[in-house]
Each structure stands twice: as C-alpha cells, then as structure tokens.
Amino acid sequence: MNIRKCVCAIILTWGLGNSAVAQVQTIVPPIVEGAKPVTVEHIKVHSKSIEGNLSGTSADRDVFVFLPPSYKKSIKQHYPVVYALHGYFIGAEQWGSEIHVPQTIEGTFALGSREMIVVMPDSKNAYNGSMYSSSVTTGDFENFIAHDLVDYIDKHYRTIATRTSRGLVGHSMGGYGASRIGMKHADVFGSLYIMSPCCLSARDPGTFNAEVQQQFESIKTPEESAKINFMVRATLAVAAAWSPNPNNPPLYLDLPYKNSELQKEVVNKWAANAPLSFVDQYVDQLKQYRAIAIDVGNQDTLNVDTTKLHEVLDSYKVPHSFEVYSGTHTSAVADRFQNRVLPFFSHSLCMQKSC
C-alpha cells in the first residue's frame, strides 16, 4: 500500500481529507443592491484557556468582528452575536474569503435579516487545526470559544449578553466544533447551526506502513509537520487534540500505531471525542436551544454521518431542522451563509435584553 492510500484510510474516516483540500470553491451570491457596509475589526483576544500548552500555540488569537451598519450610529442599541467557526487547514481570514464576508453579511441584512454582530475567531495552529477541543498539547480551544472569547466580546462590544442572544455556527471542522461545543455549552449559546460537520463518528483508524511511521518519527516540532504529506499532518492534528500525552516529547501526543501495533487506548480516546458517541449524554442540553439547524450537501461524503446525527436528534425528539441540499462540501457554503445561516439566527436569536 502506498503512503497516500494508507493515510487516506485514516483521515477520510474522520472527514478531514478531501473536504479540507477542497475547501476553496463556492458559489458567490450576487451583490445585493443598496446593501449598507458593515464595519470590520481585526483584533487579538488573549485566551487563558490556551496559555501554557505544550506545542507553543499562541494564546493571543486573531479574531474578526463584523459590526452591523447601525452599530456606530445607534450608540444605545445592543446586538445579538453569532460566533462562526472555520474548518481544517484554513484560518478565519481564509474562510472569510471563501464565504465572501463582509459581502454576504451585508447582503443578508439588505435582504431583511435583523442586524447582529458576527465574530470569526481563528483556531488554526501548527497542525492546521485545533479540532475545537481541550488538549494540554495544543490548548483548550473549546473553552476559548465558549468562555474566553464570549467574555471578551461581551466586555468590549454592545452585545445582548445572554445565551438566548448568542448563536454558534461552524462548517466542516467548524461544524464538528459547533456540534461539540454546542452540546456541552448550551448554557452559553441559544441557537445552533451545524454545517457539513466532520469527524462525527468513531471508526477504525486504518493501518500504518513503515514509510508513514518514518515520517512521523522525523518530526521534532509541530512546525516541522508542514514538510510532510497533508494527510499525515491531519493525523497529527487529531492526535494532538484527542490523544495528547505530556510525557511523550517532542510532540506530546500518542498515535494510533506504535511499532506497527494498534494502540487501543488511543483509538478509544479518539472515539470518546466523536459526537455520535457522546450525543446521548447531552440530550437535555440540546433541548434547551431555541433552535437547531443542520445541513449538508448531497454530494458531500459527510452526508452519511450528518444524517445519523439528525436521526439521533429525531429519536430523542430534539426540535431541529435538517436539510440535504444540492451541492458538494464547499460549493454552496457562501450562498448558504448569506441566505440560510444568518436568516436562521435573525429569526431564532433574541433581539432584546428582556428575552
């Protein structure tokens, strides 16, 4: 088995392979005539949750904040906030280009959506993705999103600082993040939109050959992972997030194979981080949401597991909407962000302090 086939068997089971590579093509909705400009702020947010991680990931995170057209003029008005999470291998800035913000944000307001603040945090690291998880190796990105970032935005902007006025959305790895964080932090967010989520299932990690093992052993720092095969690098991202090991320098992680032998304890750790494995524990939390939406393209390889998540929520009678639309993993994401996602939050988020 050649190296690409070998590692693809591992990565594609998690939905990080072709989806991540292809995350560049999307249909751009037309500019809406008369749309008023939003204000874009590029800020740094320090996260105590990410401090002290073993891989040296910076705790000072880039964040893009999109303020609605009326924000600068209506100085007494407070706004709901939508937190939008990007996918694997890209950061917030690149995802913003792919979903064509601020154009799509301006377009949705011009088409009738009520104004809100949109926040796009960057959760890329040396392994190209944090998985929005809690790891001593790469940092606690779950709590960076759910607590540090939310606290910062509430303190520095005129937000409606209640869960019913906060929305969470993500695509691909960000869809995984929205699933994971959404299930665990229903006390923070009031509406949830999950777009083409990766990594929902716990599956067999495949096999390694000697060449793959040699690539892993050649890496001495997270930054050196940039020189190896893309698919192998994605395996490191998953391992750094879900099987960290503070006693295993220099990368401080455990891989599913060691000396060509499957490490069952590592596989079990990966399985424990699969939303379809732990969703049953969070049914009561999911029922607290004002609204939940899930979507996926009919040509997306992630539609099977996404459908399973829908079926689980259905079985527990968790209110939600589910749509399989015509498209690939990335073909419609910009259009849907403007015409589905933000209108969803316009209807579901509380727009007043009294809610």
Image: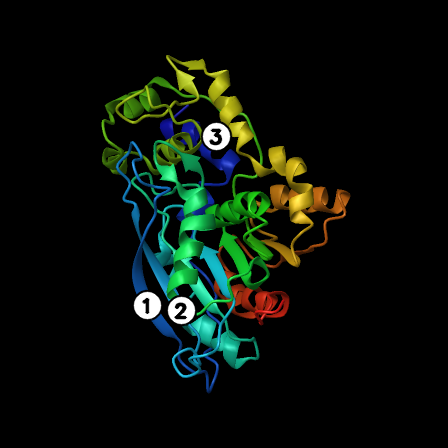
Q: Position of residue 35 (x, y in %)?
A: 46, 83
In the displayed structure image, the side of residue 139 where residue 195 appears, left or right: right
> Gap in Å between the C-alphas at discs 1 and 3?
41 Å
In the displayed structure image, the side of residue 171 where residue 50 appears, left or right: left
* Residue nearest the observer in this picture, 219 or 105: 105
Precedes in sequence: disc 1 or disc 3: 3
Q: Are marks 2 and 3 in contact (CB under 8 Å)?
A: no
- The amino acid type, in three-letter code, at marker 2 is Phe
* Residue nearest the observer in this picture, 72 or 213: 72
> Gap in Å between the C-alphas at discs 2 and 1?
6 Å
Q: Is residue 301 visible?
A: no
Q: Is residue 265 visible?
A: yes
Question: Which residue in the protein does label 1 denote?
Answer: 41
Precedes in sequence: disc 2 or disc 1: 1
Q: Are marks 2 and 1 in contact (CB under 8 Å)?
A: yes
Quadrant in which the N terminus appears? top left
Question: Which residue in the protein does label 3 denote?
Answer: 9
Question: Which residue in the protein does label 2 denote?
Answer: 66
